[in-house]
Amino acid sequence: MKQILYKLFEHQYLGREEAREILQNIALGKYTDAQVASLITVFLMRNISVEELCGFRDALLEMCVPIDFSDYAPIDIVGTGGDGKNTFNISTSACFVLAASGYPVVKHGNYGATSVSGASNVMEQHGVTFTNDTDKLKKSMENCNIAYLHAPLFNPALKAVAPVRKALAVRTFFNMLGPLVNPVKPRYQLLGVYNLPLLRLYSYTFQESNTQFAVVHSLDGYDEISLTGEFKVATSTNEKIYTPESLGFNRYTEADLYGGDTPEEAAKIFDNVMNNTATSAQKEVVIANAAFAVQILEPKKSMEECIAIVRETLESGKALATFKKFLSLNQ
């Protein structure tokens, strides 16, 4: 590790294979906490490269609990977190709307790190029992088009760095890996990021794979489509800036999307969305994110068609019915 640290201190970059081996060694406990903390600190002081990120991702995917959902060709909707906005569970809500619209979803999530409620928090609030049992997860997929994968059950390698990450208490490159290490390796992904350099980094990283993707960033700092201002969407073929109004939505404020002060409050907002009793802002932002996910899956559909599909799903009660079915299978 000493040689690796000297290399990094001299502003050199790791190769993909080198990064893969380093992360494997971290997971195997071959380095001390102080060495791992030093390594992490390097990436707080400079940007991570595509090669380094891909190498770290390769290592985690090799060590994850494998699960084959290729028959379903599912999508995941996920944000990097770290935007400091403490929104309600927008991507999780959008996943259930998408599933209720007939599209297979494999949601890979965890407890909130920079907000009061991550995907696993809201699932736990509803009594969901986390599992890595393939048969149970496939039963959920077959009956309601969605399976939930609690990240720690599938990425045991991350346990080795948990104490260091907690002690440092700052955002690290491990946060960036979360959206890339869904063990299902979904064919489709809608990913939200909190700044433009990350949008480019993830776009380049996805282009190294066969993933059909859209990376989104709201220009006022959200890691999702927030409808609080202009937002950028990058796909394998183009990049485009949208305004809420250009898609027929109103423009909202940061306060409109606030997720509350406790996981219970965030769960209540999630319930309101599923019940179609949420505020216009809460409802519209979920529709917007779900609609862009539909367009990844069906690129020939216009955005107006995609919005109409998910709006009907939410307003007709299909999303609520799907969520209730999901709970009956996962508690």
Image: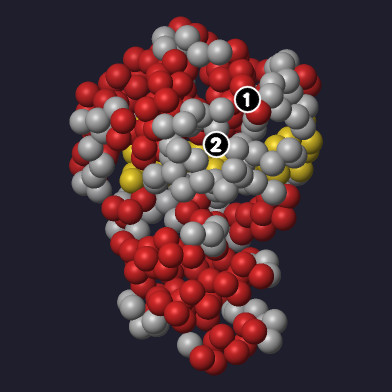
| Residue that extends furthest to the bottom in the rendered view of this protein | 3
Quadrant housing residue 232? top right
Say which of 102 and 251 sits in front.
251
**Residue 276, percent from left and from top:** 47, 11
Above or below: residue 100 compared with residue 153: above
Q: Is residue 282 left or right of residue 220?
A: left
Q: Amino acid at mark 2?
A: Asn
Above or below: residue 307 compared with residue 204: above
**Residue 154, percent from left and from top:** 32, 55
Identify the secondary structure beneath mark 1.
Answer: helix
Residue 255 got which mark? Answer: 1
Look at the image and tell me in which quarter the C terminus lies. Answer: top left
Q: Residues within 10 Å of mark 2 (few under 14, many from 20)?
A: many
In the image, what residue occupies the spot 51% across and 56% down? Answer: 175
What is the distance, in whole Å, between disc 2 and disc 1 at their CAs? 10 Å
Tell which circle, 2 or 1, labels the residue nearer the N-terminal end: 2
Residue 309 visible here: no
Identify the secondary structure beneath mark 2.
Answer: loop
Residue topped by disc 2: 86
Above or below: residue 89 compared with residue 169: above
In the image, what residue occupies the spot 22% across and 24% down? Answer: 328
Q: Amino acid at mark 1?
A: Ala
Residue 264 visible here: yes
Q: Is residue 299 left or right of residue 290?
A: right
Q: Is residue 9 left or right of residue 265?
A: right
Say which of 275 and 55 sits in front.
275
**Residue 82, percent from left and from top:** 57, 48
**Residue 319, percent from left and from top:** 42, 17
Q: How many badges with numbers are in the image? A: 2
In the image, what residue occupies the spot 24% across and 44% down? Answer: 131
